[in-house]
Image: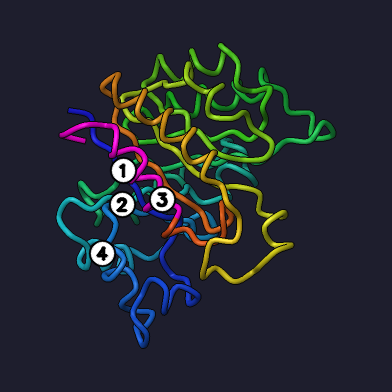
Amino acid sequence: MAKFLHGTAGWSYADWVGPFYEEGTPEGAYLERYAARFPAAEVDSTYYRTPPAKMVQRWAEVTPENFVFSPKMVGEVTHEKFLVGCDGLVEKFMAAMRPLGAKLSWVVLQFPYYKKADGVTLEGFLERLVPFLDRHRDKPFAVEVRNKPFLKPELIRVLSERGTPLVLIDHVWMPPPSALRGMFTASTVPVRLLGDRYGIEKITTKWEKVVVDREDRLQEWADLIRSALAEGRDVQAFANNHFAGYAPATAARLAELVLDSAGPGH
């Protein structure tokens, strides 16, 4: 039976104390309190640096048995080295994640938006991606691109042949959910509700309440998620504060929309 897991991008937000965490909750207790409300979490901080194994061990210790984490690969691999000459960094990162055991879900390879001046075409991107994935077939990588023209049959084929999930994202530069239905490339469909970071930061930089009504877009994502579940694919969906202003409310509402119509077992 296909499973639907949901959560937010990170959990360490002081602005959530009051609306999400009880007043007075210390930062060191955030994750434990978070895991009592959501079954999964995206780890954004790992993009900036590989965490010490002791920190990862604590993540495992304070969360329930069936909780899962989806960390981002360190950006030095995807951005600075662009998948070349970075196998040592990859192994170091995966070793740091080892304490999670079965709680480790997909490790997201988040690639940047490539401007025309960068000279990165889909063909050039695949020339880097294919050998990297083939060298690391034993690792649970998922691929996120932010160039709309990259969402072509060639990329879908490469990922599908390797059982590598394409991360479907809500982003101002990318297609709406209705255009993504043919892009399920693995048994799990990762979804990231990113939103318009620059647009929402013109409204607020405090993440304590919803400031943009995105109910219609959430319904579109719920429809897409239900279609994936109906195909027997698991779905993991994470909401960012930038989607509507307050990620916990976004994640909870998405789950309501999905599960209200998904039927028993999801």
Determine the CA span between mark 4 and mark 3: 14 Å
Determine the CA span between mark 4 and mark 1: 15 Å
Badge 3 amino acid: Pro
The mark that comes first in sequence, 4 or 3, is 4
Pointer 4 with pointer 3, Cβ within 8 A: no
Query: Is the residue 37 above or below the residue 67 in the image?
Result: below
Badge 4 amino acid: Gln
Q: Is residue 3 left or right of residue 69?
A: left
The mark that comes first in sequence, 4 or 2, is 2
- Where residue 128 sits: x, y (%)? 59, 27
Determine the CA span between mark 1 and mark 3: 8 Å
Determine the CA span between mark 3 and mark 2: 11 Å
Residue marked by disc 3: 71
Query: Is the residue 143 above or below the residue 185 in the image?
Result: below
Badge 1 amino acid: Ser
- Where residue 93 sits: x, y (%)? 41, 51
The mark that comes first in sequence, 4 or 1, is 4
Residue 196, which numbered label?
A: none
- Where residue 131 sits: x, y (%)? 50, 23
The mark that comes first in sequence, 3 or 2, is 2
How many tags in the picture?
4
In what element is the residue under mark 3? strand
What span is in magenta? 250-266
Label 4 crowd (10 A; few <14 / some 14-19 / many >=20): some
Residue marked by disc 2: 40
Q: Is residue 227 left or right of residue 102?
A: right
